[in-house]
Image (spheres, grey):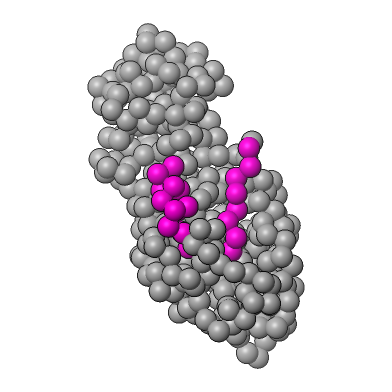
């Protein structure tokens, strides 16, 4: 980290519009282009994240640099993953202009976050980002799986998705994102973000989600259980929410194996996925593996249904219609990109 006599100069409404004009960006709600224009909001995100001077922070979708500059007030290094080549090309100059002396503390990676397989430099310790709303859950889970060095983080997502990520068993919105996020971390809602801090103002609400890494839950035997196996069980359990586990898991294995696994795991076969904690799913997965089942044998039907659940299709459709706020161009998921069901 380079010492400077003055901190970064953050972007306000006038500066954001000036940069947009320079780059010939015309943000529209239909294209999901909404830029953060309030310095207090990005400072709040950084403060709530709990990052400090020793952290190496991953940011996804830095866009014009509003959050990046706020991070540089506190942290030593930022690795910014940006899909748009115009925005990625402008960001280093923005840092040089508004945070002189900190240019070497920001590394821009031109890539789709869902296709990133490694990052340059020291291992990152935190994720702080205004995630692309149309792929927020897959991006979060992909980075949690890819970067075990990430200890904590805070992300801004669409309010509906924030509720799902932090949901607890028994909630109407508890589902695939809730369980998979809980496998990696302790997750909590960290507040709401008003619409007036974006330009143009969107028609959807935003929420903050904070998390702290935890060790993956062990099976009842005390041994680790492969994430792929656990997530396969999660996907199947929520593929048909109204089905009891005994029926839902038959998409994975024959009835005899399912019955034996549920009995061994001590899980009620008539329970539904929405009533189980992540440790229950781990126990069922371990028991299924013990019957000779393999996660690679999961059915195409369960995979397709789980993919629809995991991507929060309803929330994404609403975001596309109303214009979900992002401080960047939307990162579009390409066919074959790692999704939530296999993150």
Seen from the viewer's position, the closer of residues 133 and 9 is: 133
The segment highlighted magenta reads 313-335
Most distant residue in the bottom direction: 5
Above or below, 9 against 193 in this view is below
Q: Does the magenta segment cover residue 51?
A: no
Q: Does the magenta segment cover residue 316?
A: yes
On screen, residue 192 versus residue 27, left or right, reads: left
Tell me which residue sits at (51%, 50%) in the image: 134
Image position, residue 233 (x, y; %): 43, 27
Image position, residue 2 (x, y; %): 70, 79
From where the camera sits, is residue 154 visible?
A: no
From where the camera sits, is residue 296 visible?
A: yes
Image position, residue 208 (x, y; %): 41, 62
Image position, residue 22 (x, y; %): 68, 77
Tell me which residue sits at (65%, 91%) in the image: 5
Q: Quadrant of residue 92?
A: bottom right
Above or below, 94 against 251 in this view is below
Tell me which residue sits at (60%, 60%) in the image: 329
On screen, residue 27 versus residue 203, left or right, reads: right
Q: In which quarter of the image is the N terminus?
A: bottom right
On screen, residue 108 versus residue 290, left or right, reads: right
Seen from the viewer's position, the closer of residues 221 and 314 is: 314
Q: Quadrant of the C terminus?
A: top right
């Amino acid at each position: 980290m380079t010492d400077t006599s003055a901190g970064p100069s953050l972007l306000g409404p006038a500066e954001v519009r000036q940069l947009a004009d320079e780059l010939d960006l015309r943000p529209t709600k239909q294209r999901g282009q909404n830029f953060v224009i309030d310095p207090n909001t990005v400072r709040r995100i950084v403060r709530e994240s709990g990052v400090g001077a020793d952290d190496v922070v991953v940011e996804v979708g830095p866009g014009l640099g509003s959050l990046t500059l706020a991070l540089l007030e506190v942290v030593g290094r930022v690795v910014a993953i940006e899909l748009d080549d115009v925005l990625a090309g402008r960001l280093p100059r923005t840092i040089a202009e508004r945070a002189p002396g900190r240019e070497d503390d920001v590394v821009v990676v031109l890539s789709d976050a869902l296709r990133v397989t490694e990052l340059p430099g020291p291992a990152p310790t935190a994720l702080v980002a205004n995630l692309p709303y149309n792929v927020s859950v897959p991006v979060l889970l992909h980075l949690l799986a890819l970067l075990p060095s990430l200890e904590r983080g805070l992300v801004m997502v669409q309010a509906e998705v924030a509720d799902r990520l932090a949901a607890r068993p028994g909630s109407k919105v508890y589902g695939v994102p809730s369980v998979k996020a809980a496998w990696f971390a302790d997750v909590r809602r960290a507040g709401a973000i008003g619409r007036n801090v974006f330009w143009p103002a969107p028609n959807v609400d935003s929420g903050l989600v904070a998390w702290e890494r935890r060790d993956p839950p062990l099976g009842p035997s005390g041994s680790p259980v492969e994430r792929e196996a656990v997530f396969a069980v999660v996907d199947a359990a929520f593929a048909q929410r109204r089905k009891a586990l005994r029926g839902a898991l038959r998409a994975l294995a024959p009835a005899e194996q399912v019955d034996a696994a549920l009995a061994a795991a001590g899980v009620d076969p008539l329970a539904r996925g929405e009533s189980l904690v992540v440790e229950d799913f781990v126990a069922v997965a371990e028991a299924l593996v013990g019957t000779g089942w393999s996660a690679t044998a999961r059915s195409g039907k369960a995979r397709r249904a789980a993919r629809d659940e995991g991507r929060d299709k309803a929330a994404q459709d609403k975001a596309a219609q109303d214009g979900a706020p992002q401080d960047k161009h939307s990162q579009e998921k390409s066919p074959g990109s790692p999704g939530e069901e296999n993150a």
